[in-house]
Amino acid sequence: MLTEQAARPDLADWRRKVEDLYEKIRAWTSEMEPRPTFATEPISIIERWSGEYQLPQLLIRQGEDEMTVRPVARAVVGAEGRVDLEGLDGPFVLVLHESEPEPPFRTPKGVVIPARRTTRGWFWAEDRAPWGLIPLDGPLFRELAESCLR
Amino acid sequence: MTNPLMSIMGWYAVALDSMRITERVINKDMRAAITNRHVFRRHESKEISLASIKGAERELADLVVLSLVATFERTLRDHVMERPGRIIVSDDPVDAAIHEAILNDIEYWRIADRLIGIFEKRIGSDLRGQVRQIIGYRNWVAHGRATAIPPDGNVAPQFAFEQLTGFLERTGIIDPA
C-alpha cells in the first residue's frame, strides 16, 4: 500500500531497500553448505508511479541449482514493497512493511483482534493457513532457499 | 460466522502445491510421472514446460483475487441486506413494499463506494482504501487487463485475503480467527 507517508515512493529509496535485503541474504546464506555463489542481473519493472525502471535481481547458485530473488513492485496493496523467491519451489512472497504496526482492534462484539505484526521490516507472507506474516530472518530465509534449491 | 474466504485460500494452497510438485517432477526428469495424456509431453523442452507452469501460477493468483473479492462482496451485501428487515418491523403492506424496494436497491449499490462507504464510522480510511484498491485490481483482471499496469499496485492473494478478512472481522460480520 502507498500510505500517506509514502505516497510518492522514491526509486533510490526502493533500490536501497532491495540492496539492503540482498546484503542480508548474502550474510544469511553464508552458513549454507555447500556455500552458494551470487550474481545479479538487471530486470525491468513497470509501475504506475514510476514508469519503467531497472533493478537487479539476485541469482543464488548452489551446485547446479539456482534460485532468484526478484523484485516485483514497490506499489503493493497492503505493504510497501514485494520481492519473490523463485526456484524449484516458490514463488515465496516477501513483503516490506515500513509503517508502524496497527494496535489491536476491538470489534463491535467486543472481541479484540490482535495486530497482525508487531515490528517493521521484511516478512514472508505465508502461502498456507493461517496465511500470516512471518518476520524474515536467517533461519527462515535458509529454509525457503533450501526449498527453492533442492 | 466463519470466514468464507478461507475455503478459497484452501483450494489455492492445494493448486499451488500441485503446480510446485509438477515443477519438481519436470525439473528432476521424473519422466515416468508424465504420460501421453499430459500437456507437458507435447512441449519441446523442459524450459517451455517450466515457463508454462510459472505463467499458470500467475494466472491462478489473479483468479484467486477475483474469487476472494466476489465472495467478499456477496458476504458484505448479504449482511447489509439483513439490516433493513431489523429496522422496518411492521405488518403494513406499504412498509413491506418499502422494505422490498430497499433490498432491490441495495443489490445495485456499487461495492467500491456505497457498500464500503457505509462502514466509514467503523473502519479506518486506510483499510477502506486498501479494500477499494483490491476491488480495483479485481476489476482490472475481470475486464481483461486493459492497461499494462494494474491501477493501484500489485495484489497477491495473501494481501487480498489479509485485507478483506480484516474488513469483515472489524465490521463484526465474521468471527476473528
Image: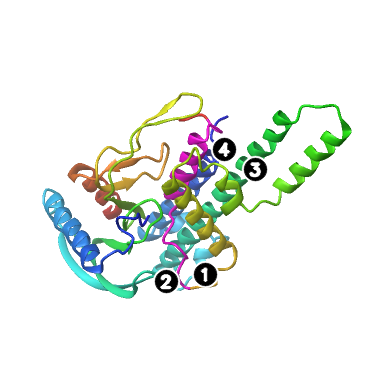
Respond whether the residues carrying marks 1 and 2 are from the same subunit: yes
Q: Which mark is residue B42?
A: 1
Respond whether the residues carrying marks 1 and 4 are from the same subunit: yes
Q: Which mark is residue B77?
A: 3
| In the rendered image, the vertical position of residue A70 relative to residue B66, given as above or below | below
Q: Residue furthest top?
A: A110
The label nearer to you, 3 versus 1, is 3
**Structural distance between the alpha carbons of marks 4 and 2:** 41 Å
The label nearer to you, 4 versus 2, is 4
The label nearer to you, 1 versus 4, is 4
Which residue is drawn at the image coordinates 71% and 35% (left, top)?
Answer: B84
Q: State which tag comes first along the sequence, 4 or 2.
A: 4
- Secondary structure beneath dot 2 equals loop
Q: Magenta residues?
A: B148-174
> Foreground residue, A47 or B132?
B132
Coordinates of residue B96 in the picture (x, y in percent) = 83, 34
Respond whether the residues carrying marks 3 and 1 are from the same subunit: yes
Q: Which mark is residue B4?
A: 4
Coordinates of residue A62 in the picture (x, y in percent) = 19, 58
State yes or no: discs 1 and 2 in contact (Cβ < 8 Å): no
**Structural distance between the alpha carbons of marks 3 and 4:** 13 Å
Q: State which tag comes first along the sequence, 1 or 4.
A: 4
Q: Is residue B167 magenta?
A: yes
The label nearer to you, 3 versus 2, is 3
Residue labelled with disc 2: B45
Q: State which tag comes first along the sequence, 3 or 2.
A: 2
Compared across the picture, whether B156 is left or right of B80 comes to left
**Structural distance between the alpha carbons of marks 1 and 2:** 9 Å
